[in-house]
Image: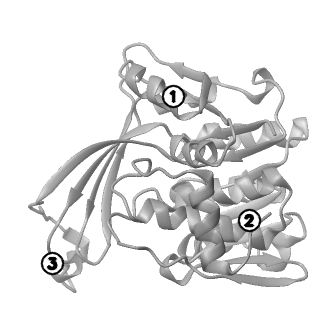
């Protein structure tokens, strides 16, 4: 299957705070917060929503095409992605700009405070599905907001089935933009908090969304995920992690596993389960693409968890 993955391409700067952020947020003073957290460690990792999703798809035997903009510092990252099985021919490097950067601190409870530098990502709107070649399935994941709106519109016009994944950009997209993205999508995917924001900003309830989309996929962290369809809801449990190291990129891995299921023609429940297994692997490692597994290892873990083979 020809899969195009769009979204941010970034470097992640991951820091660990040994305390709890909530202990330093004082009620009655939230209108003038001024805090600095002394972290114990910092790691620079390859990141960005799109490469993380594409990496999981590559681990599972697909060769997704990554479409996005990166900076003059992307050469090493490009070589690594190609070696991992990701086609980077649709990635444009922008001269004079650095690749987008994600600065994230995680406390001992798994809460995160993050900042994102746009960098070359601001040029994502200069790319187009019209020039991308054949595509059977696409995902519009967090990126430059204008580019996300453009990509969704192009997919609708060209008849490309797409997953709409506004995630971190829900706050930046307005109600009209979110409605258009949902209405034309094959599937909407987001976490439970983002889902509540989407409903509030669009004025659409679940029935309104399902009048257009095939399904709504709502992730719920350690409580797994739910797949909402016109015929009912499927609840997917989280796969127990062998260790919990870092939540960064877990949602992206879920999306990659889910898309692998779609690529094989699997039912939505199996897609959700594949996403859950992929998410567990990411949670067990630092960063969104530092883990690895063979397809055989992945399928064995799926069978051990769910009692049957996925396909």
Q: Position of residue 266 (x, y in %)?
A: 83, 62
Mark 2 vs 3, N-terminal side: 3
Q: Position of residue 88 (x, y in %)?
A: 59, 25
In depth, the one of 28 and 285 nearer the eye is 285
Name the residue located 59 percent from the left edge and 33 percent from the top edge.
85
Q: Which residue is mark 2?
A: 271
Q: Position of residue 237 (x, y in %)?
A: 61, 82
In depth, the one of 226 and 295 nearer the eye is 295
What quarter of the picture does the C terminus occupy? bottom right
Instruction: Check the image and report above or below for 289 versus 196.
Output: above
Q: Is residue 277 left or right of residue 291?
A: right
Query: For the residue labelled by badge 3, is the local secondary structure a helix, a strand or a loop?
Result: helix
In three-dimensional space, the C-alpha distance between marks 1 and 2, rounded to whole angstroms, equals 26 Å
Q: Which residue is mark 3?
A: 24
Query: Quick one: label 3, few (<14), some, or many (20+) residues within 10 Å?
Result: few
In three-dimensional space, the C-alpha distance between marks 2 and 3, rounded to whole angstroms, equals 40 Å
């Amino acid at each position: 299957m020809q899969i195009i993955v769009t979204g941010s391409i970034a470097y992640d700067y991951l820091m660990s705070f040994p305390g709890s952020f909530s202990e330093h947020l004082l009620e009655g003073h939230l209108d003038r917060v001024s805090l600095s957290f002394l972290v114990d460690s910092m790691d620079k990792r390859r990141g960005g929503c799109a490469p993380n999703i594409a990496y999981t798809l590559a681990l599972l035997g697909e060769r997704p095409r990554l479409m996005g903009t990166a900076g003059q510092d992307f050469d090493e990252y490009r070589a690594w992605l190609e070696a991992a099985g990701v086609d980077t021919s649709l990635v444009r490097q922008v001269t004079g700009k650095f690749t987008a950067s994600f600065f994230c601190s995680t406390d001992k409870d798994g809460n995160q405070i993050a900042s994102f530098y746009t960098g070359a990502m601001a040029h994502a709107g200069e790319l187009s599905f019209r020039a991308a070649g054949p595509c059977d399935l696409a995902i519009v994941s967090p990126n430059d907001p204008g580019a996300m709106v453009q990509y969704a519109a192009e997919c609708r016009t060209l008849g490309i089935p797409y997953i709409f994944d506004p995630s971190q950009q829900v706050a930046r997209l307005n109600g009209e933009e979110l409605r258009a993205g949902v209405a034309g999508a094959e599937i909407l995917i987001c976490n439970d908090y983002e889902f509540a924001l989407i409903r509030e900003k669009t004025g659409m309830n679940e029935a309104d969304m399902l009048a257009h989309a095939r399904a709504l996929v709502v992730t719920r962290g350690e409580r797994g995920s739910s797949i909402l369809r016109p015929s009912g809801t499927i609840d997917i449990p989280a796969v127990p992690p062998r260790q919990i190291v870092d939540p960064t990129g877990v949602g992206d891995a879920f999306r990659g596993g889910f898309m692998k299921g779609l690529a094989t023609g699997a039912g939505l429940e199996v897609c959700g389960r594949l996403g859950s297994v992929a998410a567990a692997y990411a949670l067990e490692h630092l960063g969104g693409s530092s883990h690895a597994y063979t397809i055989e290892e992945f399928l064995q873990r799926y069978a051990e968890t769910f009692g049957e083979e996925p396909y």
